[in-house]
Amino acid sequence: MKVKRGSIHRDPCLKSINSLYTRVENFFSKNPQFKSNKRFYVDHYSSVEFDLSADEVVDVIFFGDCVKKFFESGNWNFSSCRFWVLSMANKRILENFLGIEDIVNVVPRDEIFNIGESKQIDWEEELDLVFAGRLSAQKNITLILSVLNSLNKNGVKCSLHLFGSYDDTYHEDYGRRENKEYETKVLKQIENLKLSQSVTFYGELAEDQWLNTKFSNPVYISLSSYICEDFGCSVAQSQQKGWPLIISDWGGHKDIFGKGIYKIPSSLISHSHLPKEITSLMGDKIARYLLECDQMRHLKPKYEIDITNSISLDFIDKARRKTIKALGGSALLLNREFLSHFSDTVKGTIFLDKIRSFMSSNIKNISVISFDFDTYEESFSDSFLKTLRNMEMNDVNVFYISSKNIFDKDSLKRILSSERVVLNKFKESDKIYSYLIDKVKIDVSCIYYE
């Protein structure tokens, strides 16, 4: 049956997009000094009704999907604009495309939501870990389960409360994959870890319902590494309530400030498509990190809004074309439907590695090589897992490289940029070890292999 013509496109992030749209509109209405008369929200369904041939300066507001939306700018027809985003990460991404610093404005986080002061977590008390949002691989729910299990093993009594509905969207920036039911994977992990008495599912509730659910000691947790994670509405709502936060130091989460916030280094965030042994190991690392770190107070980012600088469409076109020229034919795949296809190209992988570096801000790299990280049947040697368990990984980018891709240009680029290489033991690993030393010229002291 045909969908009704007037129906809104069902973006999986529609609820958050609508909330942010309303709040950002309030921000502009409260700040007439910005002289914002025309606003174009590229992620919001209202954009299809916008007059793209406006003569005056247009304020273009990007939400999470700024990478793909930037490449749609060839469809715009207004003469000049000002760029606005919701996070410092997206500011860095767009300014990298444009080749100019301090040209993209950030809507201050505390202008969108009132920020409350969160209390410190008392690890001696029983904790109610809470997540609200899409139960999706993009939100790394399986990693949250591993952290729950590891905290319990370390003597911290805690339960997990999940609000939201399942969807089968995956991390497109790591390439195409079969859309298997994520719910089945989550439930299987709960069964394997014997967590059925510790996890409660509530389904999708209205905002006021999940926030007003009674908990003895609520702690909000989000370990998202979603490539479009630019804000985090549920995180902001929890902070308004004064709940402590355990969050990934990633994307928009990096801008969250105040007391009682525990930011997990992005290098410890294993995405949902990695084998269960890696997820379990990182769950242990995160639990140890939480129990060893002191309460952290994160300072407010320095927002500097400059409304005097507008960008011409001619300049944007040149910047876009320059990037497309570097990407070659793979750029044709960089749109709403084919980001995962784009990621499976060599130039796409290198490009998205750079985007992820803006989301994490880590400088150093580690390459971890095994037979095949793309299947869940991978086996790991005890020495390999021990090396990863004992390795300091709090401030690095971790590249998980399958041996079948070892000779690809993007894999070699990752390896050559790494200060350490960890190699698992498998059938062809001795040959790969020799290849890394003899052909790639990696110093033997930088390779961990037994």
Image (cartoon, helix red, strand yellow):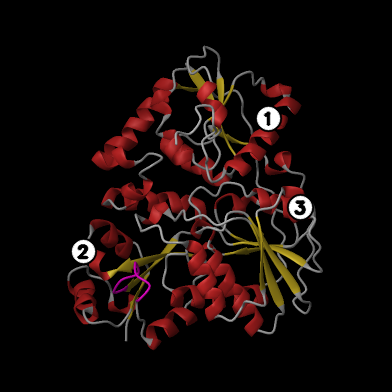
User: Dividing the image into 4 quarters, which one contains the N terminus?
Assistant: top left
Q: Name which residue type carries label 1.
A: Glu
The single residue placed furthest to the front in the displayed view is: 1
Range of magenta residues: 370-377
Residue 445: image x %, image y %? 32, 79
Q: Which percent across, then down, holds residue 330?
A: 27, 43
Q: Which mark is residue 4?
A: none
Residue 300 pos. (x, y %): 69, 49
From the viewer's side, name the closer residue of 319 and 39: 39
Q: Quadrant of the C terminus?
A: bottom left
Q: Circles 3 and 2: CB distance less than 8 Å? A: no
Badge 3: how crowded within 10 Å, few (<14), some, or many (20+)?
A: few
Q: In this rendering, does residue 137 appear at all? A: yes
The residue tagged 1 is 25
From mark 1 to mark 2, how far is it between C-alphas?
49 Å
- Spatial CA distance of label 3 from label 2 is 52 Å
Label 3 is placed on what type of residue? Answer: Gln
Task: Give the residue pinned by disc 2.
Answer: 407
